[in-house]
Image: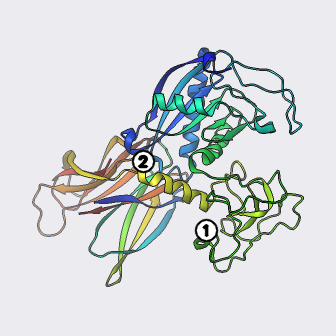
Amino acid sequence: MRVGVQFTGSVGANASGRWFTHSWPPDWNVVWTVVPTTPAPGAPQVEWDVEVQRASATAITYWIDVRNLSAAPVAIEGRFAVLP
Amino acid sequence: MSAADGVVVGRSKLVDHGADGVRWCLVILSDGYRTTELPTFHADAAAFVEKLFATPPFTEMWCAINVYRVDVSSTDSGADSPAVCADGNPGSGTTSATFFDSTFCTNGTRRLLAGDQGLALLTAQAQVPEADATVVIVNTTEYGGAGGSVAFFSRHGAASEIGVHELGHSAFSLADEYADLNSGWSAGEPPEPNLTTITDRATTKWSELVAAATPLPTQPNPDCSTENLAASPVAVGSVGLFEGGGRSRCGVYRPEHQCRMRTLGQPFCTVCRRAIRRRLTPFMPVATGPRLGVQFSGTVAARVTQRWFTYDWPACWNVIWTVTTSTPVTPGPGLDWQVRVERSSRERITYWIDIENLTSTPIDVSARYAIVAE
């Protein structure tokens, strides 16, 4: 199993941002999560959806849409876990 | 003016992301704080930690880092301030009996604030054997700092900015990118990752980061008698060769027009961020477990969305959530769920899990976690 941070960025207040990451081996079992790095206690800040593109026989592209649920900009990091 | 002028009081772990042996350990020491002033040092150290966390790439590398505060009390407050300095900037002439003997006017430059680096390293390692980097906060509000094997910085309003800059020197071997001292560069190719004398596109130090359309040199300095303060000829963030750095105005190049190693308040440039990441990456959490469990169970009424939250999860844990039901449902799906995340503090996360019952009867649900890195 491997874990890491694939991307970082910022999403505007009540806005969405899209990231993509390409050339992932199709036989890898990859789980994506997103966490804010801007502390803001009291309410959920982000949610995300993952879309998948089979770019070729040997590569997958993941598209991750991150929605900022708060009224302030939020910095985020996109984490991956490659499961065995 | 030495270790006889104070005492090591003790240590506290301010940031704990795991065993010291597998994390990059930063030690924050105090100098020029009397015993009664140590609460001020505690606040200063906390402010520095917050600044470091808020400064990319430390934000995304945060889970690689442990931070210790070591309280060292001194006989006197402040730092030495020589009345005469070679750069012509006078000081107050006061001397202070402090543990690490911090003084302004190091190497003849008034703003260079430094002290006994060897004693600082010994003190840090005695308190934190796995120490990887050491900084000293000096109890004076005058602007100053310096980065050698140990970074020193004052309590000036820009103190935490200075501290992060000096840490760039001491922990990540980054060079200054300002050009305030010499007209030319005569030292050969610098070892630091963020300066170069090589202008060939194929072989310059950060060639793989330079776009084909970016001219090289990107911004020559037409007058080596003065630092080139003109606006950038390329878009902000473009990597190229900008003449001036390492305190020399010509003959040496930095990667971007601006950088924290050039100007306080600026983000680290791409090349400096890369150097910091490379140093910290081996200390990032690796996959573990997974450690599995059920965090909560409950019943969701027909056609209703119900929300749960679970708090105080370490922000550095990589947690995967799934929701399942024990209520048989046919045909079609029985539930949907959405995970939302709140960074409740620098170190903690609250997960909010909305579970929607898609059926016309109540269903029993449970939320499962898998901790895949901690």
Chain assignment, label 1:
B
Quarter in which the N terminus of chain B is drawn:
top right
Q: Secondary structure at mark 1?
A: loop
Residue B203 picture location, percent across and down: 62, 74
Mark number for residue B342?
A: 2
Give the image quarter of residue A42: top left
Discs 2, 1: same chain: yes
Tell me if mark 2 has few (under 14), some (14-19) or many (20+) residues whose alpha carbon lies within 10 angstroms of its own.
Answer: many
Q: Is residue A12 visible?
A: no
Residue B178 picture location, percent across and down: 76, 54
| Residue at image location 42% in from the left, 49% down from the top | B283
Q: Colour mode?
A: rainbow
Q: Secondary structure at mark 2?
A: strand
Work out which residue is located at the far bottom of the displayed protein and give it. A57
Give the image quarter of residue B320: bottom left
Which residue is label 1 attached to?
B206
> Compared to A71, does B240 lie above or below?
below
Q: CA distance from mark 2 to mark 1?
A: 37 Å
Tell me if mark 1 has few (under 14), some (14-19) or many (20+) residues whose alpha carbon lies within 10 angstroms of its own.
Answer: many
Chain assignment, label 2:
B
- Point out the tag, 2 or 1, that comes first from the N-terminus: 1
